[in-house]
Image (tube, coloured by chain):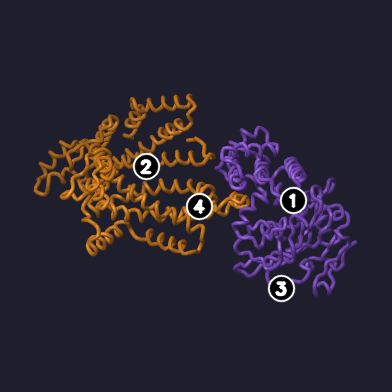
């Protein structure tokens, strides 16, 4: 069984303007040491998936069906206090814009100590040393001095390293990285992603990489799930997905992803918008944007098509 | 402009300023950024203080009322008024009066009050502790209620405490201080008889004030170990401090709630929650510490407002503070006393702001020691 299993998860938000069905029957698993990418445009449900796993969803969110297990523990049945103890120890999360994700008026070393103090069975006097070695593990130069720095005294890339050091301080078995390189410059992006990959390999950690950047996911993930409007529309090993995309949306995403030598004219924007997730929705939520739509697409349940044991696509007419 | 000579004299003013400048240089060389910052800020307030001195001088003289006539009494004739005016030096042209005022000021002499016959500085120093005591208790009362309430309201938006907070903020902001004071006297003294007579700081028939150390009766009573007097002084303090504090409560509670809400929705709180930190630690060590900065700057402002509103509440409760003194001075056109009062308030205001800024540098590492 995989370390992290999301099974048939549906989440909705009760808002003043109606019920938003943010996730519908999302299934995803991450094995030990595996990096799985969740790719999609803004509003596709990537982050909601991540927050639901962490138990950090907004109060307006309601899990209507499905299950999430981590290492055999049923996360949806766990009491809030039990979830809090798992967060930071068994599962950790890093965020985009690391500078604002750290407490601006607390020394970064102290912030790591806070996590260690809560989750690691360490005597108080060893906390500082442990925090410094957490910083050293993510190869922050001169960690003793950096531990005394405030976030505003560090660069964005350095702050993201601190975030990673903090997330990995208690060697969690699951790491969720929510757009970890957004807002960092390109060379720093590569350094940070290399670090995440190295760490997940070294500790056999299951990593869920949430990104809108298919290119980034293609480079670092073992498998990729493509999300659209609260559905996973296609999931496959990275190479297979990039070479033989079967869902029209995946193909569109690939065409919209810049590659070396591509010019602006070569990039194709995806026509249309995400559908409004309130009210009645067609079984295929992409049908409104799909060029290959057939009348039958709007009827009946939408089947999963299995192109290979690892390659699933949620489309009646997969491309080949 | 007649101002020029005074300004020059003040800015060349002998010892204190030169000492301050030397202290700035010394502190900077010694690598003490905080002290250098304090000195630099103090030097930077000199222009505003000069402005205050000039303005109060001319405004107090522009006000209707003639101190000579006031002192000569209702039975006086023109000749006796004129002779009093001459003894007071008020027959001289304004610029000449101004120059001698500045000259006195440079020597730390605020002049002599016409009503009390004492040096203004002595009067003010004697009464200031009473006002500070009242304002401090009012502020403590306001902080003690407003900050927990704001924090609590922010953690449970639209909960019971949040609604109570909103109601209290609206009510306390809507009613003028003196009205609340009168209402309290009516209810708690006149109707219920719970409070002592609203006639000053201590029931001096039953008690005698404690030996003066700080001038604040409550503190002096503690120093003297005189518990009955402490109790009596506190009993006198309750109503005025609460009426004054209610007025301070609204801005503090509002800012605390808003700043706390903002802090709680910020990215670093999300990180703290994702790290599984306990709720209490997230609220206090993470959210609330970030709220201290906006709250402290509001506290500074509120405290200076409080010292200002003292004027009204001291009238209502017969409090022998600087506010009541200032009101009496304005009515009597007691120029020296009015000027002294305003100048003292300006200095207090400057010191208060400085204290807030120093506090900010201690709370927030991002705030640098810049002037």
Q: Are marks 4 and 3 on the same chain?
A: no
Residue B89's x, y, as percent?
19, 36
Mark closer to the observer (2, 1)? 1
- Mark 2: secondary structure: helix
Res. A293 image quadrant: bottom right
Res. B119 image quadrant: top left
Q: Which mark is residue B259?
A: 4
Q: Which mark is residue A6?
A: none
Marks 3 and 1, Cα distance to the nearest angstrom? 34 Å
Q: Are marks 3 and 2 on the same chain?
A: no
Marks 4 and 3, Cα distance to the nearest angstrom? 40 Å
Callout 1 crowding tier (Cα within 10 Å): few <14, some 14–19, many ≥20: many
Callout 2 crowding tier (Cα within 10 Å): few <14, some 14–19, many ≥20: some
Residue at numbered disc 1: A207
Q: Are marks 2 and 1 on the same chain?
A: no
Mark closer to the observer (3, 1)? 1
Marks 1 and 4, Cα distance to the nearest angstrom? 35 Å
Residue at numbered disc 2: B349
């Amino acid at each position: 069984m995989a370390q992290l299993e999301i099974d048939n998860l549906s989440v909705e938000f009760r808002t003043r303007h109606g019920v938003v069905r943010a996730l519908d029957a999302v299934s995803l698993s991450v094995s030990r040491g595996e990096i799985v990418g969740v790719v999609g445009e803004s509003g596709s449900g990537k982050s909601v998936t991540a927050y639901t796993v962490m138990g950090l969803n907004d109060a307006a969110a309601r899990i209507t069906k499905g299950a999430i297990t981590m290492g055999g523990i049923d996360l949806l049945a766990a009491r809030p206090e039990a979830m809090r103890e798992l967060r930071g120890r068994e599962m950790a999360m890093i965020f985009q814009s690391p500078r604002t994700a750290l407490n601006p008026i607390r020394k970064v070393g102290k912030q790591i100590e806070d996590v260690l103090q809560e989750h690691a069975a360490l005597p108080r006097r060893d906390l500082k040393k442990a925090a410094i070695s957490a910083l050293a593990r993510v190869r922050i130069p001169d960690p003793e001095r950096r531990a005394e720095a405030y976030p505003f005294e560090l660069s964005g890339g350095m702050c993201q390293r601190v975030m990673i050091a903090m997330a990995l301080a208690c060697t969690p078995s699951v790491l969720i990285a929510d757009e970890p390189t957004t807002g960092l410059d390109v060379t720093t992006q590569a350094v940070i992603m290399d670090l995440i990959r190295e760490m997940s390999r070294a500790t056999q950690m299951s990593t869920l990489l949430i990104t809108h950047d298919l290119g980034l996911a293609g480079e670092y993930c073992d498998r990729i799930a493509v999300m659209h409007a609260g559905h996973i529309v296609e999931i496959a090993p990275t190479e297979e997905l990039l070479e033989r995309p079967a869902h029209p949306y995946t193909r569109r995403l690939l065409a919209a992803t810049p590659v070396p030598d591509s010019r602006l004219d070569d990039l194709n924007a995806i026509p249309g918008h995400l559908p409004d997730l309130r009210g009645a929705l067609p079984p295929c939520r992409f049908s409104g944007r799909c060029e290959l739509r057939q009348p039958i697409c709007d009827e009946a349940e939408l089947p999963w098509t299995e192109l290979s044991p690892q390659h699933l696509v949620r489309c009646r007419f997969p491309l080949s | 402009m007649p101002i020029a000579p005074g300004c020059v004299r003040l800015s060349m003013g002998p010892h204190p300023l030169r000492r301050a400048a030397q202290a700035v240089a010394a502190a900077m060389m010694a690598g003490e950024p905080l002290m250098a910052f304090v000195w630099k800020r103090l030097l930077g307030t000199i222009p505003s203080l000069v402005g205050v001195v000039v303005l109060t001088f001319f405004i107090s003289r522009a006000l209707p009322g003639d101190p000579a006539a006031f002192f000569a009494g209702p039975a006086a004739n023109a000749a006796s008024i004129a002779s009093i005016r001459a003894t007071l030096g008020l027959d001289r042209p304004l610029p000449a009066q101004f120059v001698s005022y500045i000259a006195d000021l440079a020597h730390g002499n605020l002049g002599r009050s016409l009503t009390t016959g004492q040096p203004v500085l002595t009067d003010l120093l004697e009464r200031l502790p009473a006002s500070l005591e009242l304002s401090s208790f009012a502020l403590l009362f306001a902080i003690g209620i407003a900050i927990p309430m704001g924090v609590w309201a922010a953690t449970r938006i639209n909960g019971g405490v949040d609604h109570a907070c909103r109601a209290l903020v609206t009510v306390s902001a809507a009613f003028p201080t003196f009205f609340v004071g009168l209402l309290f006297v009516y209810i708690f003294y006149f109707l219920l008889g719970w409070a002592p007579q609203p006639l000053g700081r201590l029931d001096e028939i039953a008690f005698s004030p404690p030996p003066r150390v700080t001038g604040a009766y409550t503190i002096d009573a503690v120093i003297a170990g005189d518990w009955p007097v402490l109790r009596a002084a506190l009993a006198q303090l309750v109503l005025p401090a609460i009426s004054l504090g209610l007025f301070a409560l609204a801005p503090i509670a509002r800012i605390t709630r808003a700043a706390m809400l903002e802090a709680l929705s910020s990215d670093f709180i999300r990180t703290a929650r994702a790290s599984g930190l306990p709720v209490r630690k997230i609220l206090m060590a993470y959210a609330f510490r970030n709220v201290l900065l906006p709250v402290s700057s509001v506290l500074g402002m509120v405290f200076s407002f409080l010292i200002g509103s003292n004027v009204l509440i001291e009238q209502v409760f017969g409090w022998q503070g600087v506010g009541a003194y200032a009101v009496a001075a304005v009515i009597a056109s007691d120029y020296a006393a009015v000027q002294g009062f305003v100048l003292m308030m300006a200095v207090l205001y400057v010191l208060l702001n400085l204290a807030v800024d120093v506090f900010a540098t201690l709370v927030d590492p991002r705030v640098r020691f810049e002037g």
